[in-house]
Amino acid sequence: MTGTAPGCDRKRTLPAAAEWDGRGLVIGTHLGQSFTTEDFGRAPSALPPHGVPPPPLRPGRRMAAARHRTLDFLPGARARDGTVLAALRPVFRARGMTESLHTWQHHGCLATYTSASGSFANLRIYPHGLVSLDLQSYGGDAQATEVDSLLNEVEERMKDLSRGSPGRAKRLPPIVRGGAIDRYWPTADGRLVEYDIDEVVYDEDSPYQNIKILHSKQYGNILILSGDINLAESDWVYTHAIMGSGREDYAGKDVLILGGGDGGVLCEIVKLKPRMATMVEIDQMVIDGCKKYMRKTCGDVLDQLTGDCYQVLVEDCVPVLKRYASEGRAFDYVINDLTAVPISTAPEQDSTWEFLRLILDLSMRVLKQDGKYFTQGNGVNLTEALSLYEQQLGCLYCPVEFSKEVVCVPSYLELWVFYTVWKKAQP
């Protein structure tokens, strides 16, 4: 898709209230710094020493954690509240659970069952027929097996009630809360995804952000910065897209990479024999973690900060861009691997939009007239935010045009938009 711009940090940006880091609820990021609602969570003394990852957890073992299970049943023919209770009450009582019953005229009833171990179940029977069971428990394998048995029996009894009038049952996998490994991460458009994470490989706090590298059975090691999934070892397609999807000739060219501390873009650019590739990454700890635990992504390019055709500057990219602009430096390609388009739809109030506009304008000032600027956008469903970004392209110091493409990045579990921007030809 192509178009002309209308007038006027991280790989991904999560919705507000999406993630707790070591200080509190992350409500935004700027220059890699996360802003939180309060200082909350792990004290510095609770963190492992720098450079020492926490011990891996054995795959396949269910660690002690709170588990929230649900079972919904909509019978083909509505059963009376008393009939449903009479059928299910013995299941809970046989396990020593105590019942509390609440009824409302015309609104059904709620039965709460509690056990001596602290587990509890809420059985809600709605007037239109829906029977909804929420069950929370805490424990390891033995407790989980016992609870699964209870749910199986409840489901069978509900099916027995619906003989001759088939109903619909919906039973979701348990949501595990407070476990040793966090497997839940929202997509950019706010859907909850459970990943097959089986090991915490690396977890450190830098001066700028929390850095996690988690292992996924499907995607390999995944880099997560302040709660934002950045890149997995499976995500070569992300790197391919942000470099122009194979349509560019980097041989003998000058390339500027903003961010990209995982080393993926730099690694692929170096293979294409540029004249010089300069990567500017603010966080040395991201580089250190990735060169040790993301080798499938970065290869050996991060082992040294300089090579025959590349250099890595561990600096804030804003003063570097300003310096290059004042010196008249110009690049054939600028690749912005810093941050996604913010999901906020109020650019005048969001500091991330301000940062994005600054980077865009400075990047155009160091881009050759016939050069190209590559960056990610955001999830394809965030149409309003993407439209606002395209409006920002019309507010730069020089007129530009752009194209965009949609790519499926494996670990993101959603379609992702990438932009190519270039200066309009001079008359």
Image (spheres, helix red, strand yellow):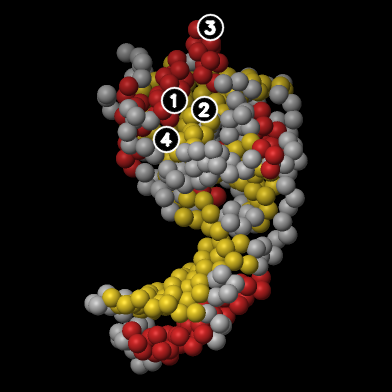
Q: Position of residue 340 (x, y in %)?
A: 46, 36
Q: Which residue is mark 3?
A: 327
Tell me how far mark 4 sits from mark 2, CA to CA: 14 Å
Q: Position of residue 401 (x, y in %)?
A: 36, 26
The extreme bottom residue here reads 164
Kindly state the secondary structure of the residue where label 3 is placed: helix
- Density class for disc 4 (Cα within 10 Å; few <14, some 14-19, many ≥20) is many
Q: Which residue is mark 2?
A: 31
* Front position among marks 4 and 2: 2
Residue at the image point whose x is 63% and y is 54% from the top: 181
Q: Position of residue 351 (x, y in %)?
A: 41, 28
Q: Which residue is mark 1?
A: 355
Please tell me whether residue 302 is drawn above or below residue 190 in the rendered image.
Answer: above
Please tell me whether residue 144 is drawn above or below residue 301 in the rendered image.
Answer: below
Q: From the viewer's perspective, tell me whether residue 108 is left or right of residue 134.
A: left
Residue 42 in view (yes/no): yes
Mark 4 and mark 2 residues within 8 Å of each other at the beta carbon: no
Kindly state the secondary structure of the residue where label 1 is placed: helix
